[in-house]
Amino acid sequence: MFSRNHAMAAAMLALAVAGCGMPPQRETPPPPTSASSSPPPSSATPTGSGSPAQDVGPALAEARSTLTEDFKLEVVGLNRVKGKHLVVQLRLSNTGKKDLPWTGELGDHTRPLGQIRWASGIGVLDAAAHTWLLPYRPDGSPCLCSDQERDDLPYAIPPGESITVYAVVPAPSGNPATATVVTPVAPPMPDVPISDEPPAGDFPDPDAQHVMPIVRRIVTPSESLDKADEIADNGTDLQVNLSSDVLFAIDKATLTGKARAVLARTAKLIDASPAAVVRVEGHADATGNHAINDPLSERRAQAVQRELESLVTRDGVRFQARGYGSRRPLYDNGTEEGRRRNRRVTVTFAKPQERQEPAADTAQTSEPAAVKAGDGQPFSMKVTGLRRLPGGLGLLTYTITNEGSAETWYNDLHQAQDWESYIYQAASNVRLTDPAGRRRYLPGRLQVGKDLYCACTDLSGVRSSTEKYAPGQTRTFWDLFALPDEAATLQVEIATFPRLDLSVG
């Protein structure tokens, strides 16, 4: 276990720092491993008191729950241990007048938990690696984190009181000085300083037992305004989906006149990439049979390969072309828009090298006054920030206020287009547009196998009443996006509110 007051533990930590490695960064968790020769604890659940020090210092960052404005979260500890783990400590406070249950709000909705008793949704954003790092999963327990029953924590926080909870997660890559702390409850908290001192309290050691890292890959999608392509960036590879409706005539495999300009954009990305191999895959919708779709998708992939080979100027690039027919749809073939997007040629290659990261900043609306919703709804919206993060990511935050005199629901934040597919309802009806670059950016996605979760405010489960507002009530929402480096101005569209212009930089 980790303990600030245990001299032997501190000495072991100092010895271990020199030989530690980076936590795995992968799309799916690796098999459980034992990272230490120490014998595993006798219990399957985390050992030790598992309790943070209750006299922790001042807050390093704070946020308010989107669902319950009286629920205040403060980061009171962020400690790197052995160079490869982080201990995150949060102080949860009830500033209201009624008891405040906390376990349901802090649970991780991307994995099955059974009973609602763990602080399993506490984690950190590894923006540079495009990953969302959640608490380790030990044998016999869903989470290396606070357990309401085991740690004798109250189910509900009384008015005016606080409790402190913890989570042990993989450390972000690159040994950063700060991290963005994430929870399911409130917007992410960027630039929280990381300490390399032992944490204040007594915590389970992931190296003393078999644990599985829980790592969610972040995929950031964008699309050209002419609907010719959409790009998914997972931090490692770019997947460029080129519309077959733009590249080819119906049932043909001969490139159209417009295709060369579209493919030239993709060739430019390949030239900037370190990729030695570029995969070109043809896909069809489900309206035809395999006898038609398979050879057509193959011929289309080969046509795109030949054109890219003539456009790419960098040496040492090898292309692989293959057709998959209708076997690998990205979207629902039951809608016209889904079928259109499934008719594609996908070009996949290593992500181009990152340029010098711009300094972190916040972009405010050029019109700071709140804007009203359409259709006579009594709601106003205000963008409160667009913050640059490492890895080409951006964090958008905004508030929505009920300006009326009665309790009212606002249900338009999750009304995304019919081809988007998420496991749960979320604040996904948000778009950033770069007019100069002619691209539109969609909220990021947390990928868990074939399932997608929006990297944005959750509006499902215990948080389904987030869309219900009392008179005068304001709620804060967030979305994670890719953020173009060179954009001076971006436009934001949020649900039914008028479009706003944002100045970047």
Image: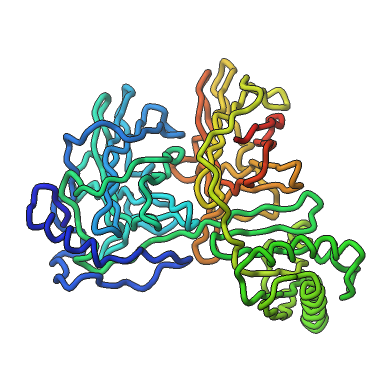
Q: For the C terminus, which image quadrant?
A: top right
Residue 306 point in image, percent of width and height: 80, 77
Task: Tell me if 385 is positioned left or right of 280 in this view.
Answer: left
Residue 241 point in image, percent of width and height: 72, 64
Total numbered circles: 0
Place residue 315 in its image quadrant. Answer: bottom right
Which residue occupies the foreground of this view, 324 or 159?
Answer: 324
Place residue 172 in its image quadrant. Answer: bottom left
Q: For the N terminus, which image quadrant?
A: bottom left
Look at 39% across and 49% down and name the residue there: 124
- Quick check: can you spot residue 329? yes
- Quick check: can you spot residue 182? no
Does 113 appear above or below 412?
Answer: below
Task: Tell me if 377 is positioned left or right of 456 in this view.
Answer: right
Does 209 appear above or below 503?
Answer: below
Residue 294 point in image, percent of width and height: 77, 81
Task: Tell me if 136 is positioned left or right of 471 in this view.
Answer: left
Look at 61% across and 46% down and name the residue there: 483
Place residue 169 in its image quadrant. Answer: bottom left
Look at 61% across and 72% down and name the residue there: 275
